[in-house]
Image (tube, grey):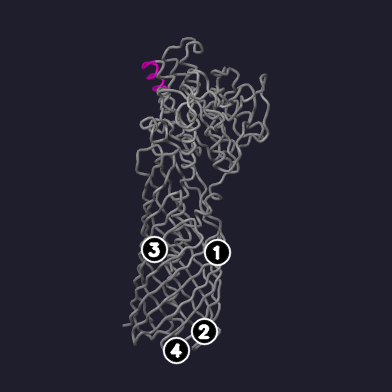
Amino acid sequence: MKLRRTALALILAFSGAAHATGWNNVVVFGDSLSDAGTFTAIAGPGGKFTTNPGPVWSENLALGLGTAPAPAQFFNGTGYSANPGGNIWAQGGARVSGSPGVGITFAQPIAAQVATYLAQTGGRADGNTLYAVWAGANDIFFWTTPATSGGADSATIQANVLAAAQGELQQIAALNAAGARQIVVLNLPDMGRTPAALAAGPTAAAGLTALSQLYNQALNSGIASSGAGVLQLDVFRLFNEILASPATFGFSVGNTATACLPAGSSSLSCGAASLAAPDAAQTFMFADGVHPTTGAHRIVSDYALSTLRAPALAAAVADQTTRTLDRQLRGSTVRQQRFLDGGRRPDSIDVYVDGQVIDTDGAALDGTPYGLTVGADRDFGDGWFGGLSISALRERLDAAGTGHARGTALALAAYGSKRVGAAYLSASFSHATVDYDLTRDIALGIASRNETGELTGSLTGLRLEAGYDLASGATRHGPFVGVGVLRTSLNGYREKSANATALRFGKQSYNQTLGSLGYQLSWQASDRLRLSGRASWEHAFGDSRRDLAVGVAGTSGDLPVRVGRDGGGHGELNLAASWQTGRDGTLGASLTVAGRQDGVRQNALLFGYSQRF
C-alpha cells in the first residue's frame, strides 16, 4: 500500500516541475555573446554576432523557459529606441562599466543596461524573473589592444581586468538589492583558444588565457561572498571540454577556422551566403574569430537549461520519500481494522508478511516499485492493540528525457489502537532512512552525457485516526478522520564527475500535514471471509513548495530554485479481503485506487499472510 504513494509523489513532482520551477520572464544583460539583434538595422543580412539568422544562447534560454525573447533596444543608426516587451539588453561591443565599447564604440556598457532597466521598473527587480549576466570579454580586448589601451603595461592591464570583474559584481549586487532572487552568471571562456587568439600567436594566446582565468577567479571569489542567489555556469570548462573533442559535439571544425567568410570579418553581417559551407552554422564551432556559431550557442543554452531544470529530479525524490513515510504510516490500517472489527481474540499474537506492487497510469514516469513488510501485533485485551513492523522498498523510476532514480528505503513503525465502545483511536509512528542513486540525462547539442549522485536522508512521521461505528456485529460501518504530520530531512549531495555539468544540491528539510476524511464498511461474509472497504478524501494542508539550492560543482554561488508541489486533494478507494485458512492462518489482499490528480492515477495491490500464535 505504501508504495502507491511513493510513485505518485515522484510523478506529481515531475508533472508539476514546469510550474514549480517556472519564471515569469527572463532578462539578460551582456555583450555580443548574448545580443539578440540590437544592431539589426545597420547589420545588413545579419543582426547578431553568430551565423545569422540562428538564435544566440540568450534567445534559446528564454524560449526554453517559456518566454519570448527580443532585444530590449534597437539602434537605428543615430541612437537607441526602446522595444516594448524586449528582455535581452545585451549589446555587442559592451564593456562592463567603461566606454567606449569595443568594435561598436557607442555600445552601452552593462552598468548602463542595468540602470536603464531598473529605471523602467521603478528601481525594482522582480523576484520571479530569472536574470542572466555574461560580461567581461570586451574589457580584456580593450586593455590588450594597444590602440585602445594606450599601450598599457601588464600590471595596468591586470588591474583593469580585475576592476572590470568587480564592476560585474557590482551589477549583480545592484540587481540583488533591487529584489532579484535568481541570477545566472556565465564566466568567461578560455579567450586564448579562440581562432583570433591562435592567429595572434602563442604569446598573445597565453596572455588571453591568463586574463580569462584572472577575471574568472575574481568573479568566483566575489560571488562566494556576495550572499546573492547566483548560479555560476562554468563556460571556461565547458568550452575546453568541447575543444578536447569537437566531433563529439557535432563540430567538424573546432577553433582552427571560422564559419563566416571572408576570414577576419565580423559575424554581425554574416548570413547564409557568407558561410564556408552550407551546414557551417552547425559544424563549425566559431562564426568568426571570437563568436560562437548557432550550434555552439545551442550547447551553451542546453547547459544553462539542463542546470536550471536539474533540481526537479532531486525534489521529486524528496516528495516521493514523504509519501513513502505517509504510506508506511497508513500501512498498519488494515492490521488495526481487523482488531477493531472484532476479528482477534485477546492475548493473541500475529506475525505477518505483506508484499506490494504498483501500477501507474497516465504518468510522465515509468517504473514498478515493489516492497516487503514484516511485522507482529497483539491484542492486549480491554480494547488495546499494538504492533511493530519493518518495511523495505526497492524501486527504479524513469523520467523520459530527464533521468531516473534507483533507490531503497527502510522504515520501522510502531502502531496501536484503543476502542472505547463504538469509538476508537489509532496511532502510528514511523522513522525511515532512504538511499537513492540519481542519474540525470543531459543533452549538449548532439552530444549526451549523464551525471550521477547519491541522495540520502531520513523521515519521521506520526499519524492519528479516529472513527465511530454506527453498527456492530457482522456488518460494521461508520465515518473516520485522520491526520498525519511528516518531517522530511534529506542531505545535500554533489554529482560525481569533474565535468562542467556536474552540480551540487543543497539540503531539503520540510514538514507536511496530510488529512483524510472518509467512510468505511466491513462485512463478515462467512466464518472464514471478511470484506471491507474505505472511501476517503485525501488532502495535503499547505504544500511541499520550497527552495532547493543548486550550483555548479567547482564554482561558487547557489541558486534557490522553487520546487515541490501545491497542496491539494484527491479521492481514494480501498477494498480489502481476508480469508482464514485454518484456525490460526489468514490470507489478505488489499487494492487501493487513487483518483486522478495532475493527470495521474495509481493502483496499488497489497497481499500477505499472517500466522497467529
Front of the two marks 1 and 3 = 1
Classed neighbour count for the residue bearing mark 2: other residues with Cα under 10 Å, few (<14), some (14–19), many (≥20): many
Number of marks in the image? 4
Q: Residue at x 38, y 60 (%)?
A: 395
The residue tagged 2 is 476
Residue 431, label in figure: 3
Label at residue 127: none
Q: Nearer the viewer, mark 3 or mark 4?
A: 4
Tell whether position 266 is magenta: no
Q: Quadrant of the N terminus?
A: bottom left
- Earlier in the chain: of badge 2 and badge 3, it is 3
Q: Which mark is residue 596?
A: 1
Question: Eyeballing the image, is 512 above or below 180?
Answer: below
Residue range highlighted in magenta: 201-211
Query: x%, y% of residue 547?
Result: 50, 48
Q: Which comes sooner in the sequence, label 2 or label 4? A: 2
The secondary structure type at the circle numbered 3 is: strand
Q: Would you name the residue on which mark 4 appears?
A: 526
Secondary structure under the numbered disc 4 in the rendered image: loop
What whole-number distance in Å separates the C-alpha atoms at marks 1 and 3? 29 Å
